[in-house]
Amino acid sequence: MTKLFFVGAFVSSMILASDKSPIRKLIDDDGIDKLKKQIVIDAKPITANGYDDGHGRNPYLTSTTQLPDTIALITYYIYDKGNEVKGGYYLYKYNLSENGGNFVANGLHKATITQLKEKYAAMGIVLLTPDQYLNTEEKKTYYTTTFQPQISKLGSFLSGIETKNVDMSVAADFYRGFDISAAADHERMVSLGFDLANKLGVDAVLSIAFEVTSNMKEVNMNGFKMALHGPNPIAKQDKKYVSQNMGAGYYAGQEYAGGYFYFKKSMHIADVEKKAIVNEQYDGIADILGAFAEKMQDEMKEAITKNSK
């Protein structure tokens, strides 16, 4: 068994896995519809008047033809907020190691990606993973090496919310870790929604990030975030757009939808035994991810209904 070492001292403990994962039990008890209502979509298409010239961080949608049919999943990662424990005069902080974080990220990906693709397919959308959209050497080189996502000065100040006090942030295999806390920055939106989407030959790009906490006994999940970026559906007009450097100008890429979901209390997803991650319990996470994707799509369609009247 591969050792997945943690940062910090070791305290021996083991929690036996139940037959049903805590997240699956939560879904069974509360119902997926109730949990879907708890998903917060804080980035959504514009429905206010005056945005038909395409300015702003979010798109002004008027037709279903503007919705993406093919989406590339460009980042899928976890970030560990850690757990601080006092021991005498010392303060120990426990985090998953990079190997441990990658192990969890890969486990989550394996447990959720098929069902998430099926959810998108049911909505008439193709969700592609790196093994599918990196289908040429040019695309592989651009995604893995050449592409450097931009960020404004203000965005740089705000970015890293997940990682400023986090010792571990790591993506699943074959993915790059693009910081989802920068999703609303206007320069980052252009980088992801226009530059990267066009280079990969897709209509939009999707980011997913999971927040976990760990110690030497267990790994818990606090929640997760999703963000969808794509090209501005409205052509730039021959006019001066104000506040271009402040997030209110015209941008070639925009955030179509995005938000977050947090459990009311941290959910147990794995045990730690002899510094190795065991008894993984990811069942149910794919259901909430699917509800998240569905809710983002609902928000876009609702905006189209309002704007097309």
Image (spheres, grey):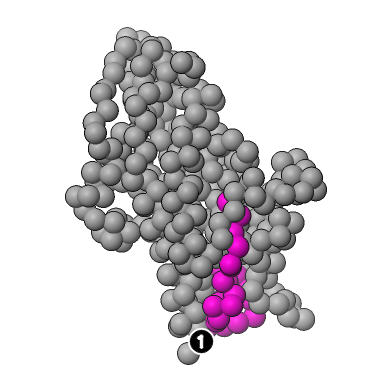
- Amino acid type indicated by mark 1: Ser
User: What kind of element bears circle 1?
Assistant: loop
Query: Which residue lies at the image location 43% right of the left edge and 41% below the top edge?
Result: 111
Vertical relation: 291 (above or below) 97: below
* Total number of numbered discs in the rendering: 1
Q: Residues within 10 Å of mark 1 (few under 14, many from 20)?
A: few
State the image coordinates of residue 269 (x, y, percent, origin top left).
34, 34
Which residue in the rendered view is the most extreme toward the left? Answer: 29
Query: Which residue lies at the image location 37% right of the left edge and 30% below the top edge?
Result: 280
Q: Would residue 222 appear left or right of 229 to someone viewing this image? A: left
State the image coordinates of residue 288 (x, y, percent, origin top left).
36, 52
State the image coordinates of residue 261 (x, y, percent, origin top left).
37, 51
Q: Nearer the viewer, residue 211 or 107?
A: 107
Which residue in the rendered view is the most extreme toward the right? Answer: 138
* Residue with the mark numbered 1: 308
Is any atom of residue 44 visible in this view? no
Vertical relation: 206 (above or below) 140: below
Q: Is residue 126 magenta?
A: no
Vertical relation: 156 (above or below) 8: below
Q: Would residue 32 appear left or right of 97 to someone viewing this image? A: left
Specify the quadrant of the image occupied by residue 32. bottom left
The magenta stretch is: 48-73
Vertical relation: 127 (above or below) 100: below
Q: Is residue 64 magenta?
A: yes
Query: Which residue lies at the image location 46% right of the left edge and 34% below the top edge?
Result: 107
State the image coordinates of residue 122 (x, y, percent, origin top left).
45, 64
